[in-house]
Image (spheres, rainbow, N blue to C red):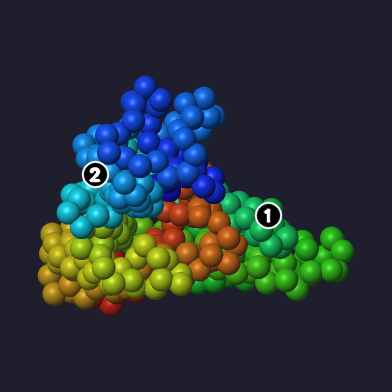
Amino acid sequence: MNDSSWAAQPHAGQAGYWGSADQGHVQGATPAGPAYDAQNAQHTRPMPIVPDVSAHGGDQDDERGVTGLSGPLFRDENPESMPDAPQPVPTPQKKSAGRDLGAAIGVGVGLGAVIIASLFIVKAVFVGVVAVAVVVGLWELTSRLQERKEIRAPLVPLAVGGAAMVVAGYVRGAEGAWVAMALTALAVLVWRMTEPPEGYLRDVTAGVFAAFYVPFLATFVTMMLAADDGPWRVLTFLLLTVVSDTGAYAVGWRFGRHKLAPRISPGKTREGLFGAVAFAMVAGALCLQFLIDDGAWWQGLLLGLAVAASATLGDLGESMIKRDLGIKDMGTLLPGHGGIMDRLDSLLPTAPVVWLLLVLFVGTG
C-alpha cells in the first residue's frame, strides 16, 4: 500500500508528519525547517500512530520518519507476497456434471419405463413411440436450421414421410424403408417448389439430409422389432448404447485428462472412450449370452466394441452440427437432457450397426 494513501507528502522545507500535536516534542529531536505548528497539522491528512518507534534525535529521526519505516502499511506490498507470510490454501473445486443430474435421472427413468412397457406389451405401440420421437426430432432439427442458418427445410413432408418410413420398416423391412425414403425425398423437392426459388437447392439438400439422418436411421430400430425375438434385440440395442454413454461419462468425469476431439466436443476425453468400450463390451457379452437366442458371449464383445464406436461417432456428429449452428442443445423438451435430438444422437447411427451385426450373428429371426 502506498504511503500517500495514509499521509500527505511534506512540503518543501517542512518535516514529515509524526502524529498529533498532543504528543509533544520528542526529546533530543532537532526539527528540520520551521517550528512545528499544531494548527497547520490539523490541515494534514491523519496517519495512524506507529508504535514502538524509538526517538534517536536529530536528523536521524527525520530520515526514519520519511524513509526508515517499513511493513505492509508503508510499502506497496501485499502481506501474502512476503516470503515469511503464510500463503492461503486454495479451496479445491468440485467437479460438476454440467447439468441438473436429478432431473436428468428422473426423465431418463420415465422414458425408460415408457419404452420398456410399450416394447414388451404391444409392438405396435412401440412403433408409435418411435414415430413420435422421429417427428419431434425433425421439428427440433428444422427449427434450429431456420433460426440459426435461415435454412427452410419443409417440415410437413418430412414429418409425414418420416412417420411412414418408420412404419414401412416394421411392416416391409429394408425394402419398405428404402421406398419410403425415396418418396419422402421426392415430396421434399416438390413441396419446396411452392416457395420462391431463392435458396431452393440449399433447403432441399437440408431436407433430404434430415430425412436420412432422423427417420431413415430410426427405421432400423423397427426392423429389429419385427423379428420373433424383436423386443430383446431392441432392448439389447438400447442397453448397449446407454451403457456405452454411461461408461464414457463416468470414466471421463473421474479420470479424463486427454481430449478426444477438442474442436468438436471439448468435454469428451480418450479415457472416456476407453470407458465406453469397456462397459459396452462387458454388457454386450452378457446380452448376447443371456438375452439373444443362439447368441454367444464373444459375439457380444464385438457388438459392444462396434456400439461404443458408433455411439461416440454419432455423438460427435451431432456436436459438429450444433457447433456449426452455434447452440448447446437442440431443444429444451427434456429437462436435464436438452431436446429429443440430444438423446437420439448416439442411438440413430448405432441402430443400423446393431441390426446388421445381429443379422450376421443370429439371422433375421
Q: Residue placed at 34% from the left, 65% from the top? A: 268
Q: Quadrant of residue 145?
A: bottom right
Q: Position of residue 327 (x, y in %)?
A: 55, 56
The answer to whether residue 5 is left or right of residue 309 is: right
Say few, some or many: other residues with alpha carbon within 10 Å of mark 2 (under 14 / 14 to 19 / 20 or more): some
User: As rendered, which of 244 and 204 lies closer to the eye?
Assistant: 244
Q: Earlier in the sequence, mark 1 or mark 2?
A: 2
Q: In this rendering, does residue 35 appear at all?
A: yes
Residue 138 appears in which quarter of the rendering? bottom right
Name the side, left or right, on which 147 lies relative to 138: right
Foreground label between 1 and 2: 2
Looking at the rendering, in which quadrant would you find the C terminus? bottom left
Residue type at mark 1: give it.
Glu
Residue drawn at (21%, 75%) of the image = 302
- Count residues near mark 1 (Cα–Cα under 10 Å), then give few for <14, some for 14-19, many for 20+: few
Residue tagged by mark 2?
Answer: 56
Which residue in the structure is indicated by mark 1? 147
Residue 190: x %, y % from top left: 77, 66
Task: Name the one closer to the observer, 81 or 187.
Answer: 81
Residue type, label 2 = His
Q: Secondary structure at mark 1?
A: helix
> Which element carries disc 2, helix, strand or loop?
loop
